[in-house]
Amino acid sequence: MAAVSLSNIVKRFDRHTVVHGIDLAIADGEFVVLVGPSGCGKSTTLRMIAGLEDASDGEIRIGERVVNRLEPKDRNIAMVFQNYAIYPHMTVHKNIAFGLRMAKLPRAEEDKRVREAAAVLGLTDLLARTPAQLSGGQRQRVAIGRAMVRNPAVFLFDEPLSNLDAQLRAQMRLEIKKLHQTLGTTIVYVTHDQIEAMTLADRIVIMRDGRIQQIGTPTEVYRDPVNVFVARFIGSPSMNLVPGGVDATRSTLRLDGIERELALPGFQRAAGKRVLLGIRPDDLRVVPGEAAAELALEARVTVVEPLGPDTLVYAQCGGHELVAKADARTPPRRGDIVRLVAQPETLHLFDASSETAIPR
Ligand SMILES: Nc1ncnc2c1ncn2[C@@H]1O[C@H](COP(=O)(O)OP(=O)(O)OP(=O)(O)O)[C@@H](O)[C@H]1O
Ligand SMILES: [Mg+2]
């Protein structure tokens, strides 16, 4: 096992810079997820850690060693890709043992490692099969097994689940989390799926255009997003954002298109500013009748989406479409006028021009 650190890592392809000086310290045994939209530099960053791409600038350490000049095979890492290559003509046993090809171990030792990995991954009974006789999830586990037998100091995963259907994804997600709990190996995991990031990570790194926007635990990035980009990216459905202006003296908020002024406790630093008010759909409840609340908005229901435990309600309010949650047993109907209520402590405020969070 090993810590991983990136100091001022830059990647240029020709004259085009795609990673702009990333600093990231990953603790020994930590599960860190890099997340962000397509093209933001996640795979490039992972491939620089793996040694599949050279860093144009900066320093990469794995454990105590600076690895910039080391070949991938000398970095003590193992990587699992989205398009994992398992060999169709080889058995599961041979496929997993393929990860040890370089190590040239005695047969007995090789067999022992393969069986240990297979036991952890629930593949013991499938060792004699070929990939054609496996499900998608089982194949993915073979690819992970091949990485595991090398006892790497660091596992690197690049979207390993994106070829699987939704149910298998959820199942494999759980298995990868258990694997981490069992092995305790440092993991750097790339995905563009924020739910995968939230459920797997000790810490999430949110990237945009080759830059880190925020690093934090899932709870931190959900509760305290540093800017509008992170606020929108983390959480599903996305945070509601409504433009408005804060009164210079009285700390009240007037949302664009909405008559009534809203009390705005805290947020002293927002006085006199143009802002975006952020409310997570989870924090915005549809309340029947007259509810006493600090922040209540009247809205007309446009779409109702039952999800089972909750019901999502889309509603129009002063020209803004808001998403809220309603009790599944008493959902409103399309066309209803409802009250949307949020608790003041759940509100987020962002500076409208810089889009950075305004602290309370
Ligand atoms: N070999 C290359 N030559 C030139 N540009 C590249 C090369 N590889 C990646 N890029 C560019 O670098 C940027 C980052 O790519 P990268 O693959 O790291 O993104 P990503 O975050 O992994 O995206 P995705 O979620 O789509 O996999 C993109 O603009 C991409 O076009
Ligand atoms: Mg990628």
Image (cartoon, helix red, strand yellow):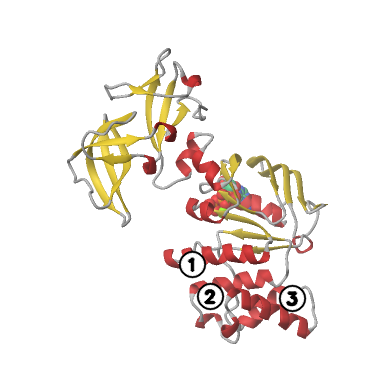
User: Residue beneath label 1, please?
Assistant: 171
Q: Is residue 55 visible?
A: no
The image quarter containing residue 190 is: bottom right
| CB-based contact (under 8 Å), mark 1 and mark 2 | no
- Viewer-nearest residue: 329 or 9: 329
**Callout 1: CB less than 8 Å from ligand 1:** no
Q: Are marks 1 and 3 in contact (CB under 8 Å)?
A: no
| Pointer 3 residue | 101
Q: Tell me the tag on residue 138.
A: 2
Q: What amino acid does circle 3 point to?
A: Arg
Helix or strand or loop: what does disc 3 sit on?
A: loop
Going 51% across and 79% down the picture, which residue do you hit? 134
Residue at 57% in and 77% down: 122
Expressed as whole percent of the image width and height from the top left, the position of residue 9 reads: 71, 43
User: Which numbered disc, 1 or 2, marks the residue closer to the eye?
Assistant: 1
Three-letter residue code for mark 2? Gln
